[in-house]
Structures are given as C-alpha cells and as structure tokens.
Amino acid sequence: MALPIEFEQRMQRLLGKEYPAFQDALARPQARGLRVNPLKITPEAFARCAPFSLTPVPWAQEGFFYPETERPGRHPYYEAGVYYIQEPSAMAVGALANVQPGKIVLDLCAAPGGKTTHLAGQMQGNGLLVANEIHPSRAAILAQSVERMGISNCLVLNETPERLAKRFPQFFDTIVVDAPCSGEGMFRKDSNPAQEEWTPALPTICAERQAGILDCAADMLRDGGTLVYSTCTFAPEENEGTLSRFLERHPAFDMVRLAHPPAQFAPAHPEWAEQGHPSVSAAFRLWPHRLQGEGHFVAVLRKTGQATCPTMAAFPVLRAKKERDAYEQTVQLVREHVKALPDGYIQQRKDRLYLLTNPYMQQTDGLRVRACGVELGILRKNRFEPSHALTHILPVSAFYRVCSLSAEDPRVEQYLRGETFPWDGEKGWTAVAVDGFVLGWGKCAGGVMKNHYPRGLRWKGN
C-alpha cells in the first residue's frame, strides 16, 4: 500500500537528505522481537537453551531479535509465559523506565501488555503495579497477558485517566504513558490498520487526547517521581509538540537527560514543534532507517521536589482465634495442591480465593477491576479446585505432582489442544510442564491425564 502523500511530504521536509533511507526502510520487512520474562528465566539462560535463532536487542537486556521464518508465538514456551512477543523499538519504553522492586508503578495506557509485562519483570514481584486500559475488550487481553506471564503484584483496571487521577493523587513513584497516537511508526507493520485510518488531521486530534492523559498522569505522580512518555508515531505535533506544551503547563517537571543513551537512539527535535521547548532534545526518536525496529518516540521526565514515602497500607490483622483458624484452613486448602505461595494475604470473594501480594490491592472499591492479584481457585462443596493462574506464578518445584514433558513430545501439543493423553502418574491435580516451565493443570486418573487447560487458550489449526 502506498504511503499517504501528505505524510510523505511532511517526512521529506523534516528528514531532508535522510528521507530516501527512511523510505527504503519502510519498504523492508519489519524487525521481529521477543522479550524474555525474568520471572521465569534469565535472558542469559534462555539464550543458551532457546529453540530459535536469537540476536540481542542492544537497548533492552531482556530483548532478542528472531528471524521472520520462525514462530515463537506458536511454541509451548510462549504459553508458559517464558517470553513476550514484542516489537523491538517498543522495548525501549520499559528499558528507559528502569523501575525498581518495591516501587508503586502505573502503566496508564497498558493494553495489550508489552510495557506492563516488561515493568513487572523489573519489579520481580515486589511493590505494586497498576495496569490500566480504558477499552474493556483490550483490558481483558491485558489481564490475560498478566496471567500468562506469572505476574503476582498487578492490579488490572478498566478506568478513564480522569477517574484514576481523582482516586490516586500523588500516589505513584513511576508512571508510563504509552499514549494513543496516529500510529505512523507502525505503517510497515503486518496487518496494521494505522495506514488506512490515517488522515492529515489525525495527529492534531491525538495530541489533544495526549494532553489530557498527561495532565492526569502529572496529578498522580509523587514529587521526585518519574514519568515516561512514548508514542509510536513520527508526527512532531504528538511528540516534541505534546511534550513542549506539557512542560509549559507543568513547570514542576524537568526532562531527564541520559548520560549514556543507546547509540541507536537519535535526539528529539524541539525545532520541529511550534514553540518547542529546548529541553525536549533530551527525548529520543527511534528511526526505522537507523535501527532494527519501528518508529518510536520516548521521553523520561522527573517531577521536582523531595521524593516521599507513601503511607504504608497493611493487610488485616487476625486477632481472634476463630478468624485465625478459619484463615489457616483456607491456606491449607491451597497448600494441598502446592508446596508454597508468594508472600501475601488470601482473600475470599464469594466462592473464589485470591492472593493479594500488596496491601494496596484491598483498596479497589468503586473501581472497574479486571484482575486483582492472583486467582487461586474456586471453593466447591467439600473441596477446592485450583485455578489456571496459580500454575503461572510458581516454579515447577512448588508442585507436588508434575507431568514433565519436553517441547518435542507430541503430548505437549495434545495438551495445548485440550486433549487427554496417557500418563502413568499419581492420581490427582498435576502440573503439566514443558522443559521445566509450567503450562497448566491436568488431573491424572487411571493412567490418563485429563485436560484442564482453559478452553479459551487452546490451540486451534496449525
């Protein structure tokens, strides 16, 4: 499909002598990447055992390029949450955010989950990660990504930025805003409608929306906190322009200038924006003719002032013996299936049990919640039925009964298709694992592994 003529004219004006190289890059196949999940395995260990041809992504220590001829999204490791398929340039956002364990972090425009899962890997299950998506169907996809990657400290919300800003004033240490944009950086991406939907007026419409989202983010960030702003467009109005106008409205924010930025990143151009703020040159443009990846824009800002610690939340203190006994019985129901759980508090909601790993997860009244902590399972009459999510937050060593298979074993594909298969193991709930990574539950009885892989996740076709 030919590029929109107005887009070509603008880019030719901005890039000048570089435009032919930019044009050639858009005609080439897109770069493909995956990002290793450090909650499951280190990037170094995965590189040694990966069944794919991998090349490191220079700007993301967990990231790797893979060839177009290979299909990691159709491999059992993907279903086990060992890695996330992510466009390589998009990995720059999480890499520059560089969040630390124990922090309180918000991914404000989070679906489908690339940035959220990247941040979660850095946090190592410690602290609170709030992932928000305004569109309900995309919020459901986001929650599914969080579950597959074994993230235990995430609260997935389906809210507007305005409602969140009222609920969480000056609450977060780090906020990532991967803003809705005109999507020009994705024009060469496979099956992407951005090019068909683009109009010359779209960048202006998107810039107005971005301003409102960033204003809400500013209200939610603590003094001393970090704001990471990104888009996947080339339009100066949405990049240097949006950032310059934000800095004018919010003088408490300063641009962060990295001492040693990745060599592949180019500085932003404040002169391309109307009344561009000079400090915006500290932001980065990722150009497809200068690196293996799509078009991206990333900026890191810091809110001035002394960093403050939040008022510490706490889990309920069970003082009465009756309460303690009831809680211990609940814990034992879960421990019948697994040897240990991450630290936290088990909460019952109707007939379901959830593990809350951060006390702030209790404060969700009035919010549209898609996922909160980890669903452990369902209480049925005289028994407890463990959930699929429980298999993703624990290593294979945490399960009493394990069906260990190799990726080449045809029973792995049978399992992922929802089929039963022969297994001469101990009767009862069993973790089905591929090369040491847990895929989900089965239930062994009479030499047969009955399938409990969720119907909505089962493989279809080739």
Image: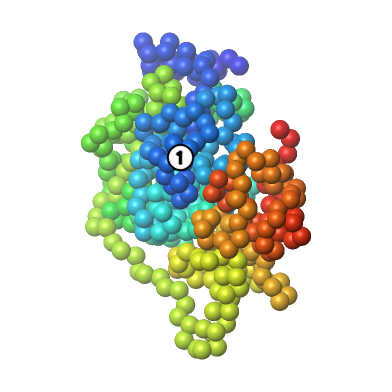
Q: Residue at x 43, y 57 (%)?
A: 125
Q: 428 or 378: which is nearer to us? A: 428
231, above or below 164, in the image: above
Horizontally, residue 114 falls left or right of residue 60, namely right
Asked if residue 458 can be seen in this view, the reply is: no
Three-letter code for the amino acid on which mark 1 is drawn: Phe
Asked if residue 129 can be seen in this view, the reply is: yes
* Whole-percent x, y for residue 217 in the image: 41, 50
* Whole-percent x, y for residue 390 in the image: 58, 60
Q: Residue at x 52, y 44 (%)?
A: 82
* Whole-percent x, y for residue 227 in the image: 36, 46
| Residue that badge 1 annotates | 46
10 Å crowding of disc 1: few (<14), some (14-19), many (20+): some
Q: Residue at x 28, y 61 (%)?
A: 308
Q: 444 or 29: which is nearer to us? A: 444
300, above or below 235, in the image: below
**Quadrant where the N terminus is found in the figure:** top right
